[in-house]
Amino acid sequence: MLTAAGIIANTNQGSIAMEIMEVGDLIRNSIEDAEVIVEGEGCSFSVVVVSILFEGYSLLKKQQMVLAAVKEPLATGELHAITVKAYTPDEWARLS
């Protein structure tokens, strides 16, 4: 299980917290069972996404699935840069 304690930076600053939440929501809405940790500010973010839906997919395909969730903000420039780390629950458990 992911925990967000200490991971989400600057949550007291309205605009940054809102952007962090928006990025997480976009991914959660696209990848139904995803657990998501988002770090960053402005228009640059780093995300860790854990989902059972990644089972059987290559690292590249997992990243493409996450990037598809944020395609529109990337295209409009609202989101400038995103780093993606995508894991299955088993992969995440081995890292933890």
Image (cartoon, rainbow, N blue to C red):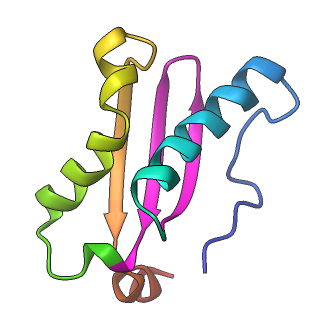
Q: Residue at x 61, y 72 (%)?
A: 2
Q: In this view, does 16 lie to the left or right of 42?
A: right
Among the 4 quarters of the image, the one containing residue 3: bottom right
**Residue projecting furthest to the top:** 77
Q: Residue at x 45, y 13 (%)?
A: 78
Q: Residue at x 34, y 48 (%)?
A: 84
**Image vertical order of residue 36 relative to residue 94, above or below:** above
**Image vertical order of residue 45 relative to residue 54, above or below:** above
Q: Which residue is drawn at 58% across and 41% down?
A: 39
> Which quadrant is the N terminus positioned in?
bottom right
Image spot of residue 46 (x, y percent) = 46, 41
Q: Is residue 53 magenta?
A: no
Image spot of residue 14 (x, y percent) = 83, 22
Most frequent secondary structure within the magenta stretch: strand
Image spot of residue 90 (x, y percent) = 37, 89
- Along the line of sight, the residue nearer the viewer: 22 or 8: 22
State the extent of the magenta-drawn residues as a range: 34-52
Q: Is residue 35 magenta?
A: yes
- Along the line of sight, the residue nearer the viewer: 26 or 46: 26
- Count of marks, rendered view: 0
Q: In this view, does 2 lie to the left or right of 87?
A: right
Q: In this view, does 17 lie to the left or right of 80?
A: right
**Image vertical order of residue 55 relative to residue 62, above or below:** below
**Image vertical order of residue 28 relative to residue 69, above or below:** below
Image spot of residue 12 (x, y percent) = 88, 31
- Along the line of sight, the residue nearer the viewer: 67 or 87: 67
